[in-house]
Image (cartoon, helix red, strand yellow):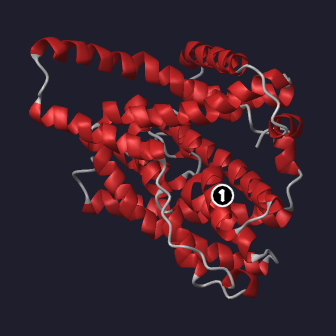
Amino acid sequence: MGNEDLMQFADKGESSPQLLGVFYCIAIALVSHATAPFLTPSNPFVLSLIYGVLIVNLIGIPKGFVPGIKYSAHQIMQMTTAALGIVTGVSGLTYFGFGLLGSFFIVFPTLALSQWLGERLNLNPNQAMLIGAGASISGASAIFETAMRIEGSEEEIGAAVKGTAVFGLISMLLYSLLLAPSRLNRSFCLSREAYSILVGSGINEASYVAAAAGFLGFEAISLALAIKIARMFMIGPGVFFFSLFLRHERAASRRTAVTSYLPLYGMAFLLCGILRAYFDAFSPLPISLEKSWNELENALKVTILPLLLSMALAGSGSQVNVREFLRAESNHMRLAAFTTLVVGLLSLVTTLIASQVLPFVIKS
């Protein structure tokens, strides 16, 4: 969530050039990549996010920057995620398949538990479902999509976004410091493959997933986001499934349609991954074009996509307002904390099981 002035400005529909905010995000991205080598065990992706948070909360951002910041946080993030399929190929498709399967064991139990605890915290069924969907599926995007299907109010949406955002950020920091293989942590850590699966299935927002996975290099981000995209496909089935068990008259009276949410950038990621796998398997390119393609792929991995991803993370961080989190109602935050913990535990269990059942996916 951005600060109130920024959000009010954006909601009024006032326009200003997006370039101001885009240049702002580019500047943060460049500074992050320049300072990352001196701030180990950090990485430029998490630094972009942190710098954005610090700037918006300690200094503030001019209103004219808002459109470009929002564009970077959403559109550039989606375009970058889609393009990651080009440099991922078969491994990305494999992780997506596992993520789709693992999501069933994470999303549905979390939605059920969020309703159970929400009732005991005196929250209405809509509020509990929105918080559960945000924590278990994909943060704000899942909350907005779910709200459209259950007719959630603006107040319910705002409370759910605040809670899932703050604990998503906390999860990103904890996963990175405690579980990622690094010089900081040698006592207990996961392999790169296992950590990518854990991050993709346990952290809600795509930007937080990318930042946490960035501790293990750019390739780990592609694998973690493949898991994350699979979770986003659970919005439609998750809402429909759980609506069958709502016993409150208000919720039970609504007929939630059996709809699926298929994010376009997620579909683009899969398409790019399929095309890359085809080229890898059959090598249809002539030798002259293959050399150019290899150069382009190297540029995408080393320079272009990392910079775009850092820009998106700078935009995401610049929309985080700590004061709004502190003003959130305690029961909403308790439920968000509970669901985040449940998702983390279920993700860890499924990741450890996968390390035994799918040794060809996760290598020690």
Q: Position of residue 35 (x, y in %)?
A: 60, 15
The answer, for residue 182, to whether it is visible in the render is: no
The quadrant where residue 12 appears: top right
Q: Is residue 193 above or below residue 74?
A: below
Please report the residue visible at 60 percent of the width from the left and 85 percent of the height from the top: 245
Please report the residue visible at 82 percent of the width from the left and 49 percent of the height from the top: 325
Would residue 325 be found to the left or right of residue 237 on screen?
right
Would residue 357 be found to the left or right of residue 352 on screen?
left
Secondary-structure class at tag 1:
helix
Count how many numbered circles sit on residues in the image: 1
Please report the residue visible at 62 percent of the width from the left and 28 percent of the height from the top: 72
Please report the residue visible at 73 percent of the width from the left and 31 percent of the height from the top: 318
Relative to the observer, which residue lies in front, 361 or 274?
274
Would residue 232 be found to the left or right of residue 52 on screen?
left
Residue under label 1, please give it: 143
The quadrant where residue 290 appears: top left
Q: Is residue 244 above or below residue 38?
A: below
Relative to the observer, which residue lies in front, 249 or 27?
249
The answer, for residue 3, to whether it is visible in the render is: yes
Q: Is residue 105 above or below residue 169?
A: below
Q: Position of residue 177 (x, y in %)?
A: 57, 40
Q: Residues within 10 Å of mark 1 (few under 14, many from 20)?
A: many
Relative to the observer, which residue lies in front, 218 or 71?
71
Q: Is residue 74 above or below residue 31?
A: below
Please state, as top left, top right, bottom left or bottom right, where the N terminus lies in the image.
top right
Given the image, on which type of amino acid does mark 1 rest?
Answer: Ile
The quadrant where residue 311 appears: top right
Q: Position of residue 29 (x, y in %)?
A: 60, 19
Q: Position of residue 279 (x, y in %)?
A: 18, 32
Would residue 163 be found to the left or right of residue 218 on screen?
right
